[in-house]
Image (tube, grey):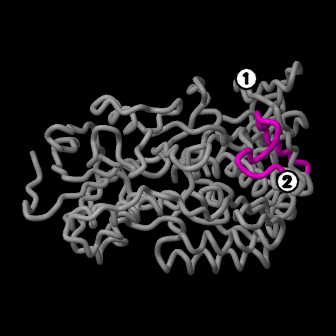
Amino acid sequence: MTQVADPSLHRVVIVGGGFGGLYAAKSLRRSPVQVTLIDRRNFHLFQPLLYQVATGSLSPADISSPLRGILSDCKNTSVLMDEVIDIDPQQQIVKMQGQNIPYDSLIVATGVSHHYFGNDHWKTTAPGLKTIEDALEMRRRIFIAFESAEKELDPVKRQAWLTFVIVGGGPTGVELAGAIADLAFKTLKKDFRSINTAAAKILLLEGMDRLLPPYPSDLSEKAAVSLTKLGVTVRTQTLVTNIEDNIATVKQGDLIEQIPARTILWAAGIKASGMGKILADCTGVVLDRVGRVRVEPDLSIAGHPNIFVIGDLANFPHQGEKPLPGIAPVAVQEGKYLAKFITEQLRGNTLPPFQYEEVGNLAVIGQNAAVADLGFVKLSGFLAWFVWSFAHIYYLIEFDNKLVVMVQWGWSYFTRNRGARLITGESTLGRIETASNGDGRSPLERKSPVEV
């Protein structure tokens, strides 16, 4: 079935409701075009704050907004919840399950996922952080670790439950490590009776010679110092060679070490979404080593001037020595640029190539601690944390999200309480290793395990 469109209007199809796709649609609301936005989910997710869902500071709804609600005032825009399975550039058709959508201009903004560097079997033991489901699974594992340690009598097994290994020292890894340290050493310290949560070991492993490799070296050093003060053990030039049986095997130089840890979290590496391969198969476009699409200066792909790729899926190598970073401001600016590009093209005008206006890089480490590279100035400590907080509130899409997050952060700042510390999903408490009292039953009053 092919959707019938108004032939008098230029048809713009956008695949992906992230920052790039959403801002392209919003910016086209007054243009003489018909827009169709396609996404597998019915909501826009503010990914930069996923780690706060994973550590109990925020709930999923605080950082998500329904796409139809966001675009309800864009009368020229339709939203379809579906998945693109192929593209026909000759017929100018986007193919979905049982439905085809014709386009005159196609914008692909489907982002990236985790990259395990050929070790995809680690996914189940070391989850990454790209979706709501990922964040909830991380949250479940983190808080089950403390609950399980509380009832574990064997000190060796208890320490394994209280050991948290974060693989990857980029912004996500740094933010996760800082948030877990804040949990263990501050938020939870009065909540348990049998364990001292301050006995937790939080290890942040990075394969390069410093944390936050894209940042200036002095900010990387300040981030490492701040994390160390929080209680995080930072280990650079350390590679994970295996994850099996709740043990992370790591290599640092010639030294190989096995780290018993019941909670291993993945924050290293990205891999482009499957749309990259679909585009390569149907257009012959060049992909980089992680599957991102190399784009032209106007964000189109070679040989197909009406197909554009933006956001994390795009490799834009035309500005500086490296491709543009995969951060929200890049995607937002690219989405706005394409809206203007298409509008001006319909008027018979042209635009100069896309030029990203640098807004800097930000990474939070803990309360009152962050690093910020704003280009014209580098900040650390409380001032960087304040800038980080303001920037993240600003980029949240809807006003109610901004208000809720501001209130939650304000409450947490003064009370250090995290109200979203819920353990949901399939519980492992009935299958965890617990100290045995000789009859094979749990030491907790010999009761059957209770699902949380």
| Mark before the other along the chain sequence, 1 or 2 | 2
Residue stretch rendered in magenta on the structure: 193-218
Image quadrant of residue 389?
A: bottom right
Give the number of the disc on residue 218.
Answer: 2
Q: Is residue 385 left or right of residue 73?
A: right
Q: Is residue 101 left or right of residue 229?
A: left
Looking at the rendered structure, the secondary structure element under dot 2 is helix
Name the residue that disc number 1 marks: 241
Q: Residue 280: image x %, image y %?
A: 35, 31
* For residue 393, above or below residue 238: below
Residue 195 covered by magenta stretch: yes
309 and 223: which is toward the camera: 309
Q: Residue 48: image x %, image y %?
A: 59, 58
- Amino acid bearing label 1: Thr
Quarter of the figure that contains the N terminus:
top left
The kind of secondary structure the magenta stretch mainly shows is loop
* For residue 27, above or below residue 20: below
Residue 194 visible, this orientation:
no
- Amino acid bearing label 2: Asp
Q: Residue 413: image x %, image y %?
A: 76, 75
346 and 374: which is toward the camera: 346
Image quadrant of residue 442?
A: top right
Residue sitting at x 82%, y 72%? 382
Nearer the observer, disc 1 or disc 2?
2
Residue sitting at x 71%, y 72%? 387
Residue sitting at x 84%, y 33%? 437
Neighbour tally class for label 1: few under 14, some 14-19, many 20 plus, Cα within 10 Å:
few
Looking at the rendered structure, the secondary structure element under dot 1 is strand
Residue 273 covered by magenta stretch: no
Q: Residue 246: image x %, image y %?
A: 73, 29
Q: Are marks 1 and 2 in contact (CB under 8 Å)?
A: no
* For residue 112, above or below residue 359: above
